Image (spheres, helix red, strand yellow):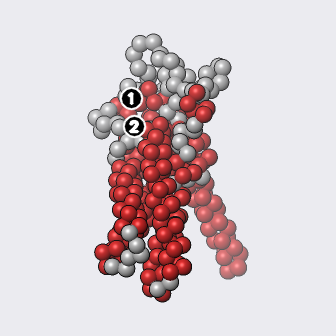
Amino acid sequence: MRIALGMQRKTAMRVALSLLVIAFSTASVFATPEDMEKFHEVTRMKESSRISQDSCMTCHTEPPEHNSFGKDLKLNLRASQKSRLDSLIIQSVASKDSDNDGWTNGQEWKADTLPGDPKSHPEGVPAKLEDGAKNESGPTVGMVDQLLPKHSMHPLVIHFPIALFLFGAVLELVGIRKRSDDLRKSAWLCLLFGAISAWFAVPTGLLAFFRVGFSWTGYALIHFFLATISTLLMTGLVLFRRRGAHTSISYIALLIAATAAVASAGHFGGLLVYGN
């Protein structure tokens, strides 16, 4: 009797856990205040706007059922393999016309109309669909986007200053500690090319920033500030080091400060792209 009762309890627990898994796996977009806050940040939506007041209807017909806009967001969220919305996911649906009313989602949230409701749209005749919007002829891509992707090669370039400078800083500190000229020569090359590559990473990052459509808030602002500071510190360190192999306290302090700035800029860049 006790064995049978125990088996029933185990079965009930398994069913309950399965239901919880299903519930979490089907969690709705904008299910948390953080998601809606991220949406406001990207779209620059005011709290008094209609979308803010009808926040549920932005992505749902009747919760938990998604409307066409919510389905597009959810599809891109799953494709990104992330658990929460971020700037890139939201921007990825800006050029789509989820409710097929002739207006892109980006045009609708700028006009404070619901992008998932075909009856809610800006006044007047629909403007020309933005590049990439879905239409009968398929997606259209501008000449610039064909030649240069929206990330503007920033993900390709940015790894050089981070890897070279951080590795060079380690070699430099070890070389100073062990008084090794060979280590310091290797460190010099890493620091030099790390600083040079940073001057290529900054403009590609700015270009990607404007083309993707980030706003000057949150992680984006912090990342830009740290990237600028770290580039200046790296350059200053290289100019200082160019005079000779320094071992002064001021040189070591500058090296540590530049290293911390580079690492922090990379960290917030990762948060900007991948989220928390």
**175 left or right of 139 in image:** left
- Within 10 Å of disc 1 (Cα), the crowding (few <14, some 14-19, many 20+) is some
Q: Position of residue 154 (x, y in %)?
A: 52, 48
Q: Quadrant where the N terminus lies?
A: bottom right
**51 left or right of 2 in image:** left
- Within 10 Å of disc 2 (Cα), the crowding (few <14, some 14-19, many 20+) is many
Question: Nearest the camera: 106 or 64?
Answer: 106
- The total of numbered circles placed on residues is 2
**1 left or right of 233 in image:** right
**17 left or right of 166 in image:** right
Outermost residue on the top side: it is 125
Question: Nearest the camera: 103 or 224?
Answer: 224
The amino acid type of the residue labelled 1 equals Lys
Evaluate whether residue 268 shows in this view: yes
**Any mark on residue 129, and which?**
none
Residue marked by disc 2: 43
Q: Are marks 2 and 1 in contact (CB under 8 Å)?
A: yes
The amino acid type of the residue labelled 2 equals Thr
Q: Position of residue 140 (x, y in %)?
A: 61, 25
**Any mark on residue 110, and which?**
1
Question: Distance of mark 2 from mark 1, alpha carbons?
Answer: 7 Å
Q: Position of residue 46 (x, y in %)?
A: 31, 36
- SS for callout 2: helix
Evaluate whether residue 114 shows in this view: no
